[in-house]
Image (cartoon, rainbow, N blue to C red):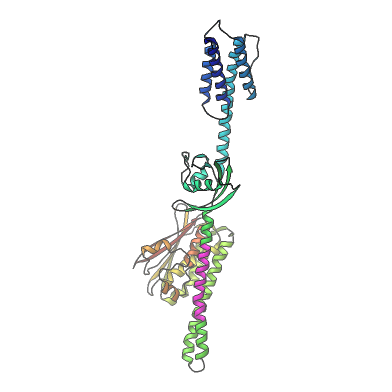
Amino acid sequence: MSRRALFWQLSAVLIVAAIVAVLSGAGVVRPWIGVAVAAIGVSLVLLIPGRRDVRMIRTIRERVETTVSAHGGTFVRHAGSDLERLSSSVGSLIKTAEAVQSAREASDREVDSILSTLGEGVVIADTAGGVYLVNDAARRMLENGGGAGMTRAPASIRRLVRHISSGAALATEVFEHGRPSRWLHATVKPVGERRALIVLHDVTANRQAAEIMKDFVADASHELKTPVAGILAASETIQSALPDEPETAATFAERLHDEALRLAALVSDLLDLSRLEADRPAMEVVSLVPIVETEFKDRRAAFDESGIGLESSLVEVKVRANAREIALAVGNLMENARVYSEAGSTVHVAVSMDDDRALVTVADQGSGIPARDLPRVFERFYRVDTARSRRSGGTGLGLAIVKYVAERHGGGVEVESALGVGSTFRFWIPKV
């Protein structure tokens, strides 16, 4: 092969390779690299005047124009030489490459924008663990933050991809991931031979709700069993002792009455909690002081009977709330203070406010709460002193109701306590 033929073939290969590299969707090289290669090829043609193979130039020009047209570009036809027309076509190639790249980047930005708005996690990964696409929701679920791109899928995702690559068309699975653990529901679909699309839903809250409900049913059943067993035993004893031992019958009749009261209180609290969880409260602007004063008056007799003093300091403050639910929370705090206070001590009830909150505080001078128990006192059925609570008719639901009321009004609860000094319980909601 002559040097001249070799030169023209090299030029043609460079230009055609540049066309493929710039305009193909394979993404093998950057567009500017392809443009540079094309420019080198054209320069080689232009550097040797007098040795221009018209047929070769025309062939290259036609390939360039065909490729530009196939990708939606345009070029200007003029009456110049084939070399001039080739130069013009390569210019059109560069413009078309820039347009294709801009369109691809715009499409990528649009896809990223759509994926970032999804609450579901979206991942495309292969069996080796390589990640080709991941949105912000998936990064959060898989504990990779929301910043830098994930380059390798965690073991749980790799396992799902390997499972789906075995031939299934679609698979779903709920799996535990991370520490602290969260539960993710994954829908997996093959994408090609070695890749899979995984759509993730965080179902941790649902799992936790189911666990809470299961625990609640178990705890409620246990709590109901105790007074019911007491009532049955007392009633049987009364039946057998009434003819011959009236004093024994009277003692067990009193016990029967106490257990019935305890059972009634438990059922009442369960109904209150059920209603709170089922209903949406009707809110209106109310003053906290009259609500607290009513509870204060209604419960004074019980405090007097227990030998416990009751005092208050009330500051006028308005809130948007359901008056009945606020009264329920205040009453439960006061009853809790009475149960855990000794005769001769005093319980102080206060209404106050700070910059944006209205606060209801109930402070007692009781035995206090151990530090280890403080994080759990607002849990359902949790008792610091089980025996004392049951003797007094406590259900273990009062503080849980207070917390629920406060949170569904947009507020929260607080507790401070020291052994031998007493406890201060407080709930707060936004003020108007």
Which of the two residues, 74 or 268, is positioned nearer the viewer here?
74
Which of the two residues, 244 or 350, is positioned nearer the viewer here?
244
Q: Is residue 68 above or below residue 159?
A: above
Which of the two residues, 33 or 364, is positioned nearer the viewer here?
33
Q: Is residue 301 magenta?
A: no
Quadrant housing the N terminus: top right
Residue 432 in view here: no
Residue pictured at 64% horizontal, 15% vertical: 76
Q: Is residue 132 above or below residue 180?
A: above
Q: Is residue 26 above or below residue 254?
A: above
Q: Is residue 262 above or below residue 409?
A: below
Image side of residue 208 versus residue 82, left or right: left
Query: Residue 20 in the image: x percent, y percent?
Result: 57, 24
Query: Residue 80 in the image: x percent, y percent?
Result: 63, 9
Q: Main secondary structure of the magenta part?
A: helix
In the image as oriented, which residue stretches furthest toward the top? 50
In the image as oriented, which residue stretches furthest toward the bottom? 244
Mark count: 0
Q: Is residue 213 magenta?
A: yes
Residue pictured at 48% horizontal, 85% vertical: 252
Which of the two residues, 46 or 419, is positioned nearer the viewer here?
46
Query: Residue 120 in the image: x percent, y percent?
Result: 56, 46
Query: Residue 233 in the image: x percent, y percent?
Result: 50, 83
In the image as oriented, which residue stretches furthest toward the front? 1
Residue 222 in view here: yes
Q: Which residues are magenta?
A: 212-231
Image side of residue 210 versus residue 422, left or right: right
